């Protein structure tokens, strides 16, 4: 299954020069007729963005499942509130030990919404951002992480 995952990090001007924006095709179509994977990285200045998020603590090996559950809960919450995401999902990671992550997973939204059962309203701050948009199977997105983290 193909999907888009948006990885984003706020950066300082000093780090900008070390990050090279890239458009990259990452593979041929699969035997199931899916499109080739793509990776688009860029640096831009982002205005603050209203969000809804879920905070998760998970192991690296369980990250995929944890993100699927978090994004699913948020999509259901948005549908209950007759709202749509204002953009692709994002995840903000904070490593807590060798195999433990604290993750804030969410979607940008058009307006502030009240929180509910672990879903919080929030804001992504304005500032210079490095972003990588990966399109393809989740288990093939390692190049997006390398591009984002290696370039900063």
Image (tube, rainbow, N blue to C red):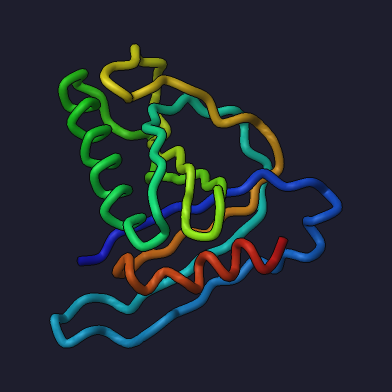
x, y percentage for residue 75? 23, 35
Q: Residue furthest top?
A: 114
Query: In the image, 22: left or right of 127?
Result: left
The percent position of residue 52, horizontal first and vertical second, equals: 38, 27
Q: Residue at (24%, 26%) from the top-left corner?
A: 78
- Which quarter shows the N terminus? bottom left
- How far from the left and from the top, in percent, is residue 26? 43, 81
Does residue 51 sit above or below 91 in this rendering? above
The residue located at (66%, 68%) in the rendering is: 150
Look at 52% across and 47% down and name the residue there: 93
Q: Residue at x 37, y 32 (%)?
A: 54
Using the rendered view, name the quadrant where residue 41 is placed: bottom right
Give the camera-side residue of 63 and 96. 96
52 displayed left or right of 20: left
Rendering coords of residue 94 (x, y %): 56, 46
Image label count? 0
Q: Quadrant of residue 30?
A: bottom left
Locate the C terminus and report the quarter of the image it occupies: bottom right
Residue 47, above or below 27: above
């Amino acid at each position: 299954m193909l999907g888009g995952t948006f990885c984003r990090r706020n950066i300082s001007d000093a780090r900008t020069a070390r990050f090279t924006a890239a458009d990259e095709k990452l593979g041929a179509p699969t035997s199931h007729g899916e499109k080739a994977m793509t990776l688009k990285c860029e640096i831009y200045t982002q205005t603050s963005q209203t969000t809804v998020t879920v905070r998760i603590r998970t192991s690296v090996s369980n990250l995929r499942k944890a993100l699927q559950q978090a994004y699913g809960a948020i999509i259901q919450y948005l549908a209950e509130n007759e709202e749509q995401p204002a953009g692709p999902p994002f995840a903000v990671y904070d490593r807590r030990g060798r195999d433990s992550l604290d993750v804030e997973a969410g979607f940008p939204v058009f307006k502030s919404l009240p929180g509910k059962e672990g879903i919080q309203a929030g804001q992504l701050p304005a500032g210079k951002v490095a972003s990588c948009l990966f399109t393809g199977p989740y288990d093939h997105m390692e190049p997006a992480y390398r591009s984002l983290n290696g370039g900063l």
